[in-house]
Amino acid sequence: MSHNYLNLLGLAFRARKITLGEEAIIDAIRSQQAKLVIIAGDASQNTTKKLTDKCRSYNVPFRIADDRNTLSQAIGKQGRVAIAVNDEGFSNKLMQLLPE
């Protein structure tokens, strides 16, 4: 998997176009603010199922990517297993860089 998306993820975080935390991400999906949800490959089955089901029901694209340490390091926060991108431009580019 290409790691070019990690730089873009860090940039989106610094631009404050990202939502962190499982409940905040679910709220962003419900309110149609989330344009893309990125879930760590090593997230628990429960978390993965909850987020993917919510994304499917609200037609929000999602990607499974790397592991929690890699995602956390990209944004400079520890222990993050899911990230919601709230900007159309960032999400479009990230979807190009992250295969389904």
Image: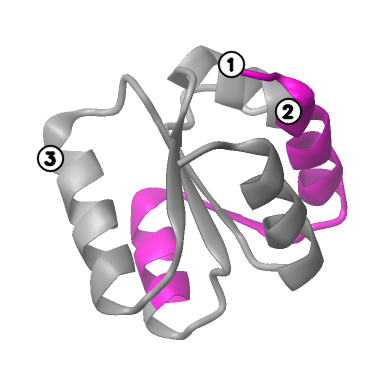
For marks 2 and 3, give the one nearer the viewer.
2
**Dot 2: within a 10 Å radius of its alpha carbon, few (fewer than 14), some, or many (20 or more) residues?**
some
Q: Tag count in the figure?
A: 3
Q: 45 above or below 14?
A: above
Q: Say which amino acid is labelled 2.
A: Leu
Q: Is residue 96 left or right of residue 8?
A: left
On-image quarter of the N terminus: top right
* Residue matched to label 1: 70
Q: Provide the secondary structure element on which disc 3 rests.
A: helix
Q: Provide the secondary structure element on which disc 1 rests.
A: helix
Residue found at x 45% / y 85%: 31
Q: 57 above or below 31?
A: above
* Residue matched to label 2: 6
Where, by quadrant of the figure, is residue 11 drawn? Answer: top right
Secondary structure mainly formed by the magenta segment: helix
Q: Is residue 77 left or right of residue 76?
A: left
Percent across and percent down for residue 22 are 36, 51
Residue found at x 60% / y 37%: 98
Upstream in sequence: badge 2 or badge 3: 2
Residue found at x 43% / y 69%: 60
Residue found at x 43% / y 53%: 62
Q: Is residue 45 left or right of residue 31?
A: left
Q: Is residue 4 visible?
A: yes
Q: How is the image coloured?
A: one colour
In the image as oriented, which residue stretches furthest toward the left? 46
* Residue matched to label 3: 46
Upstream in sequence: badge 2 or badge 1: 2
On-image quarter of the C terminus: top left
**Dot 3: within a 10 Å radius of its alpha carbon, few (fewer than 14), some, or many (20 or more) residues?**
few
Between 100 and 18, the residue placed more toward the observer is 100
Between 15 and 48, the residue placed more toward the observer is 48
Q: Which residues are magenta?
A: 1-29
